[in-house]
Each structure stands twice: as structure tokens, then as C-alpha cells.
Image (cartoon, helix red, strand yellow):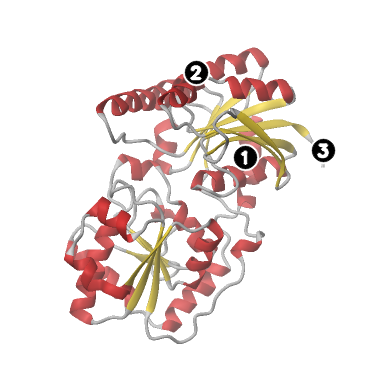
Amino acid sequence: MEIKNGVLYIGGFELPDKNAAAQRVIANGKIFKALGYQTYFLGVSKSMAEATEMEQIDDFGGFKFYQSKYPIKLTDWFKYLFTVKNVNDILKQIPNVQIIVAYNYPAIALMRLKRICNSKNISLVADCTEWYEPQGPLLFKVIKQLDTYLRMRIIHPRLDGVIAISSYLYNFYRRRIFNLIQVPPLVDLQEEKWGHYVNKGTREELTLVYAGSPGSGTKDRIDTILKSLHRIKVASGIKFVLNVIGLSEKQYKEDFGDAVYLEELGPSVIFNGRLTHIETLNEVKKADYMIFVRDQSVLNSAGFPTKFVESLSCSTPVLTNLSSNLADYLKDGVNGYELNNLTQEKLDETLKFALSQTVEKIEEMRRYIRNENTFDYTNYIEPFRYFIDQLPNKGR
């Protein structure tokens, strides 16, 4: 394959697999690679030495990989928000960069990067996956709100293209920018970690799994799930085990409070804390269902749950309500069940129905999912080719 010019992907992702952002950019990087582009990454690392600003890892899955220190101190955050020094340093090392893809990049830094790209005839594209709703101290909220406003409404429409993760973001930018593509989180189904389909056989209790970072209820309402499971257990006696991955019981109580329902659920809920990505996927494969519930908000409408994609890629049905544009992908009774969380009664009813399904029905859904490849990155190679062809420096 002829190698074209390079693509530099930059942002707050922690390679190789330490956050959902890393999974997304690697899959998109494979699309660029399939189209003949040498792809480079500049991410962040929480384990770098204090004095180190940037380091290079020569080879990562066929990609060139750089990482900068994750901002911790206030001065670090100001550098991250306003400077593009590390990007400039990389451009000096790899002069063949034709496209820069900025993943949820800070507004002022993105504006400065746009000027650099214009001077070097480089196309600048935004990979937009979030619409942040700031939390925390007042000063931080004000800064974050301003950053979000500038980035989403002022700067992104002036770039050469936008990759939108959801239909919400796609529709927002549809009349604001010419070159636009909608791309959900993707995976490479040829990777070994997605294999080894698990046939559960007969068992006395269902296994559910939740994996993620609830964010004190701003994203996933794990508390809503536990309360519903408690009511179902008391009323029906249905046997289940819920494996909670991503937070400890102590962290849960700090975020959601120490409640009687948690004590009464007892051994039906197991808090595993943080696991590696591979360990998490193995637990998802063992489960009968992945479960999560999200409130309706701009944050949840604009984003797209990576856990939904990863669960189906593990051949595990999903129990969830219809946040984002999951209605385009969740087939009730085929690859999971829709949970109606408009009222407590509706949630209990729909969750109890899913938990009452036979082993045979769940295995039927798992076989169906296994034969699908909805989120495999190869499905988006041609749409990406068209997207790239619309960039202003095509043929440079």
C-alpha cells in the first residue's frame, strides 16, 4: 500500500487502553492507516516523571506514539488550555503531517493550532465526543463553560471538518460546517480481546455487569439500578449477581450515600473497583447482561456510551434506557432490552421482564450479536475516505 502523508491525532486520551477516548482514537487511527496514512498520536500520561514534558514511544501497534504529562497542578492546566508547544515540537520532527485531528481539544489552544495549520497548509479536524456540563468550584465552572462555548459554537465551525460521535452533535453541526461525519465508538473485531464467546449453559442466577465511572450520577445512575434491583429482589425473589467495575463500595457510598437498600442487597452486589481494560472485558463476556441507565441531559445526549459498543462486541446483550442515539442500535429482545426509566414503576417492570428471560433466550441474543459487526471500524473506511477527500489540502 502506498503511504500517503501523515495524520496527527492529539488530545486527552491515555494510550494504550486506559480510557474510552483511547479506544476511540485507536480505532479511528486504523481507518486512516487503512486509507494509506501514517498515523501519529499525542496523548497524555499520568505516570510520567514530574520533570518530563513529552516522551516518544517508537512503536505502538504499528503507530508512532507521543505522550505528554497529564495536567495535575494549576500551572499544568493553564499550559494544557493555552499552549500548543508539544504539537509544534512534533511537527518539527514529522514534517509530512497533512491532517491534525484534535480530540475534544481546549478552545484557546485549538484556535492557536488553527493559525499554525493555516500557515503550514495542514487540515485541522475536530473529533467531538462530548458536550461538557461543568461541575466543581465556581471558578473552574466558569472557565469550563467559556471553553465549551468557544470550542463548540465558535471554533469547531471554522475548522476543516468535524467528526461527531452522536446524532445530537451531527445535527448541531449540520448547518454550521460543510465537512461533517458521524462516527460512533468503533472497535477492531479482529483483535483477540473481542473473541472467546462464552456459552453460559445452565445456572441458577443471572449475572449482570456494570463497568464505568458514574461521576456522582452525572453520567450513569448506578444508584437507580441498585434501588430497582433491591425492589425486584424483595418483591419477586429473582436471583442475580451484579458485578460493579470501576468503583469500590467506599467510593459508591461517598458519591451516592450509605443506604439501606445496599446493605439488604448484600452478596447480590459485588464492588470490584478498577480493573484493567482486558479484565473488564473478560467480566463483560461472562455476564448475561451489561446494564446501565442514564438521565436525559445535554452531556448524555451529545456523547455515546462506549460501554454499549464494547458489550455488544463481547456478544453480551445490553440493558439500558435510550440515551444519545441508542435507539438506532438497540433492538429490543434481539440484542438487549430497553429499560424505561421515566418512572420507578416502569423501570422495575422493564428490568424485571429482562431478568425473567430464559437461559435459551439470552443465548439466542448472544448468538445474534456475535454474528453482527455493527461497530467494526472497517464499516467506516469508505465514509472516512469521502470525508478526507473534502479536506482543503487534498492532493498536497
Q: Position of residue 360 (x, y in %)?
A: 45, 83
In the rendered structure, which amino acid carries the disc numbered 3?
Glu
Instruction: Name the N-terminal-most of marks 1 and 3.
Output: 3
Pointer 1 residue:
384
In the rendered structure, which amino acid carries the disc numbered 2?
Met
Q: Position of residue 332 (x, y in %)?
A: 38, 66
> Quick one: label 3, few (<14), some, or many (20+) residues within 10 Å?
few
Marks 1 and 3, Cα distance to the nearest angstrom?
17 Å
- Figure disc tally: 3
* Residues tagged 1 and 2 counted as in contact (Cβ below 8 A): no
Residue visible at 67% across and 15% down?
Answer: 120
Marks 3 and 2, Cα distance to the nearest angstrom?
33 Å
In the rendered structure, which amino acid carries the disc numbered 1?
Phe
Q: Secondary structure at mark 3?
A: loop
Residue visible at 44% across and 26% down?
Answer: 77
Q: Secondary structure at mark 2?
A: helix
Pointer 2 residue:
111
Quadrant including the N terminus: top right
* Residues tagged 1 and 3 counted as in contact (Cβ below 8 A): no
The answer to whether residue 148 of the structure is visible from this angle is yes
Q: Position of residue 303 (x, y in %)?
A: 41, 43
Marks 1 and 2, Cα distance to the nearest angstrom?
24 Å
Query: Which image quadrant for residue 233?
Result: bottom left
Instruction: Name the N-terminal-most of marks 3 and 2.
Output: 3
**Relative to 146, is 260 above or below?**
below
> Quick one: label 2, few (<14), some, or many (20+) residues within 10 Å?
many
Disc number lying in front (1 or 3):
3
Q: Secondary structure at mark 1?
A: helix
Pointer 3 residue:
2
Q: Position of residue 7 (x, y in %)?
A: 67, 32
